[in-house]
Image (tube, grey):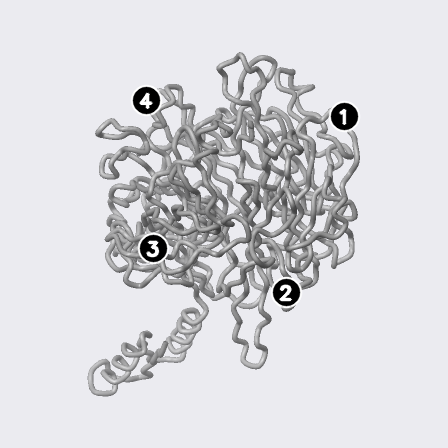
Amino acid sequence: RTHTIGFTLSTTGNAQKFINDLASYGMGKSYNASNSSELTEAFKDIVSGALLVDSPSTSGQVTLSPETKYKQRNEVYYALYKSENYDYWPGNMKSFQMKYVEAILTGGEMGQRAVLYDSKGASALNTDGTIKNSASSRWSTADGGNVDLGGVVAQFKTPALRNVFTINGATTEELIASSGLSNADLALSGDNQDNVRKGLLNFIRGYKYAAGGGTEANDKKMGDSAKSGVALATYSCASGETVLECDLADLNQVAILASNDGFIRGFDVTSGQALYEYMPKEMLPIIQHLQARKTLFINEVRNYGMDGNIVIYHDDTNSNGYINTGEDAFAYVVSGRGGPYLYALNISDKASPKLAWMIDKTRAGFTNLGDTWSTPVIGKIDINGTITPVLIFGGGYDKSQDDNPARHADTVGNALYIVNAKDGSLIWSTSSNMSYSIPSPVAVVTDTIDTSSTTDDLITDIFFGDMGGQLWRFKVNNGNAVNGLITSGGGENGIVAKLAGDTLVDSRRFYYAPVITEFSKDELKNILSVSIGSGYRAHPLSTDTKDRIYSLRLPKQVDSPTGTVITEANLAVTSLDGQTLTDESKLTNGFVIRLGEATNSAGEKVVSAAYADFDRMVFNTYIPTKTVTKNCVPGSGTQRTYNFDIATGISLLTEAYLETSVSTLPPDVTAYCNGNYCTITPGLGLLSEDNPLPKGKDKDPFVPDAKGKFNSGIWQKISWTDNFDLNL
């Protein structure tokens, strides 16, 4: 792109026309500057534009059937963001549609694959996975993947009409100059700050900043959701059909999104308009940083707000998939790098959410809580005869992990918590024997405890990794009182695998939950495959550690609270091409893929969530490209996608991995399903209709048949949002 700056030029005349035309034809911007300060700002803006990347932040969210995750609606929602060198990254949310088209699978049989289309029925993606400039998302025309165009941001109402608020004690306060919020609420200190406070409150509502509280509308904008995904809450269908059958125009649904400008927003999916914009009171101090829009420099950390994910609990008493009057529904939001906070919003009323409760480290029982990176998992446990909905989450992140790349003990985040999903009361917690923080979400296994009962399946096992490269397992003893409810799942007081060391090269960290499947083959019945990948997520450009993908095999039933602790030496090792195993006799314990050992793979690591189902596991890895020091131009990185048969430990691809260039970190691996086939999606490129499906050796690696899974009933729901049951 070509950008131009006119310094002390008249705003009319040939010179001005020349630089305007030059920028226009060069697809850049034209600037005018009359002094050194304006000239500096113009250069900063140009540099920021050169560095930015428009990107979907996480895998797209779809609406699931109340009965099975293998049947989904066709609308898909992406949170997009633009990375800049300012302390206020722009964000947006856009919706496209999924279609399922015929495709020839490995082996020659005909199947159906998912393809992403725009709202006009045209292909939405280029072959590299970028959104076409000509694509029209819902509510917009030809906005493509441009974060600044279309989407929900374009649907924002005028500032006076926006429902922007915080909760001040028991009172809902509008974020506007006339509110009753104090200077201290916004972390303003010193004398004569009243006008600053008024200006900031109007600014965050959508007005241009003016000390004293101006009311001139600003550009429409919202913060980024770089690590947050969209959550969907469904309330009704005007025409009365089921969730999957309801016409989109009749669907009463809200897309909820958290962002780093400190907000939790709910958007009506029919209009794209924001129903509410809620900023927790703990987030108010960041308003001054957003308004300052500070330029960031190397090794300078930007401000974070609501930087975590959202999960929804719905007590669907009539099992129709809709949040009906009288039914409980909550949205749980963790703040990620934004601080040690977990918020529970009561979303039973579509347009008027209420703060039900919150947890922070000042609350009794939560002193070990770190930054809440661990997205809570929802499920049900039988406590002394009472079926109880619960949230389970790790203690979070210790910021000391940012600065010390070698394995070391943490002072916060080294805990596991179980709380009541409705009132937030602490049911059980432990930090015993836990030296390392747990930013990872947990993974749970469920099972039918009493086959004669009509109650939902209950959580039986909890798995998670930590910053010390350890894998933990706890057993849930359903029916017991709290003092006997949770016990060790084997190993060493719950540690079932130790997969790291204290040296820098062995300092493996687990930021993401393990993915779990149960073997269906006769000789492997009642064996769980627990797969997890390591990587320094806080420093993805690091090349000091040899990271790994592990696929461990553990018994479904645990008879003893102690047992063997698995190490890497106990595992079979895949070859560099993924086609053979070393020490195949050790496959009874599982296998390991040693990252960073192939050509041009220094620093290869797992920095996104994996997927496991259909007897296969799919991981994305990231390989950083070193900066070209001669001119300080950052090179793009490399994404590798591994697709392995969990039974054999052999790649389902004709090679060990697929490889593509990426300009951001790899996305989470997800799956889009129509009830017949699922398309396992390691990146948007696989959803481009112009890309052929990658071929496998003996079965299709990315489009497995979902019909048998659904019809045989091997997956059972335990609530409207649960997707993790392994009951075979």
- Residue 480: x %, y % from top left: 65, 16
In primary-sequence order, the first of circles 2 and 3 is 3
* Cα separation between marks 2 and 4: 54 Å
Q: Is residue 717 above or below residue 145?
A: above
At x 65%, y 29%, the residue is 526
Foreground mark, 4 or 1, reads: 1
In primary-sequence order, the first of circles 4 and 1 is 4
Give the left or right position of residue 240, taking residue 285 as reference.
left
Residue position marked by numbered label 4 in the rendering: 325
- The disc labelled 2 sits on which kind of residue? Ser
In primary-sequence order, the first of circles 2 and 4 is 4
- The disc labelled 4 sits on which kind of residue? Thr
- The disc labelled 3 sits on which kind of residue? Lys
Report crowding for label 2: few under 14, some 14 to 19, many 20 or more residues within 10 A (C-alpha): some
Residue position marked by numbered label 2 in the rendering: 601
Residue 181 in view, yes or no: no
Foreground mark, 2 or 3, reads: 2
